Amino acid sequence: HLPLFWTMRIGSGVGSLVQYFILRKVGPHPYNGAHIALITFIVSIEITIMALMTGGFESDQFAALAALLMTTCLFPPWGAWKVLGNGVCIFAPYFVLNFAFDPEYTVSQIAFNGTFYSMIWLVAILMSRVKMTLLEEWYERARETRELKIKQDHDYMLTQALVRPLAV
């Protein structure tokens, strides 16, 4: 399995780099969320395949999906709805592929793992809300600072205009 895993890891790494450069080049755009969700979906399928090949839910790859959720939800400036949608892109393939291809996949495992992922998902949603609140506060402070600087510049120019005739 190791050559296949290396190929998949390299492929997802290259895919992530390509995604980074595309998003950096196009800047903010309404379709960026869909683009990120598609790449996340592809990476989650790769991780799911690796997990299935190494023991399904007992695999160490199981934790990789939780890490994928946290990183894709914490780094982009996403609100709770995008985190929710991104979580579906990550967990749906995992549950569907395990259900379809793992003969030992039981209802109790579905319940346990679904609960586990739901808790991680809830934490990611709450953290995204806190992050967005902090970003909004930071942007508001930056806007206020910019407005004060402009006012200060205008005051300086007005003072210079008033003092100039007296300097003669």
Image (tube, rainbow, N blue to C red):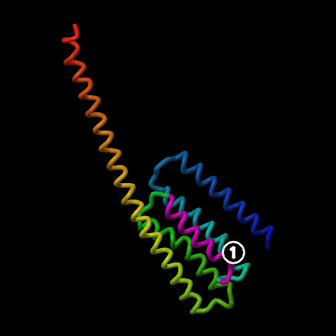
Tag 1 secondary structure: helix
Q: Position of residue 111 (x, y in %)?
A: 53, 88
Quarter of the image where the C terminus is located: top left
What residue is shown at x 46% (from left), y 67% (from top)? 83
Residue range highlighted in magenta: 58-75
Q: Position of residue 26 (x, y in %)?
A: 52, 47
Quarter of the image where the N terminus is located: bottom right
In the rendered view, does 50 fall on the left or right side of 134?
A: right
Query: Is residue 83 within the magenta segment?
Result: no
In front: 167, or 121?
Answer: 167
What is the chief secondary structure element of the magenta stretch? helix
Mark 1 neighbour density, 10 Å: few (under 14) some (14–19) many (20 or more)? many
Q: Position of residue 80 (x, y in %)?
A: 41, 67
In the depicted structure, whether residue 105 falls above or below residue 5: below
What residue is shown at x 42% (from left), y 61% (from top)? 131
In the depicted structure, whether residue 159 falls above or below residue 69: above
Residue 92 placement: quadrant: bottom right
What residue is shown at x 67% (from left), y 77% (from top)? 60
What residue is shown at x 46% (from left), y 70% (from top)? 84
Q: Position of residue 110 (x, y in %)?
A: 57, 87
Q: Residue furthest front?
A: 167
Query: Is residue 61 within the magenta segment?
Result: yes
In the rendered view, does 100 fall on the left or right side of 92?
A: right
User: How many numbered badges does the structure rendering display?
Assistant: 1
The three-letter amino acid code for the residue at tag 1 is Ile
Q: Residue furthest top?
A: 168
In the rendered view, does 10 fall on the left or right side of 83?
A: right
Residue 157 placement: quadrant: top left
Q: Which residue is mark 1?
A: 49
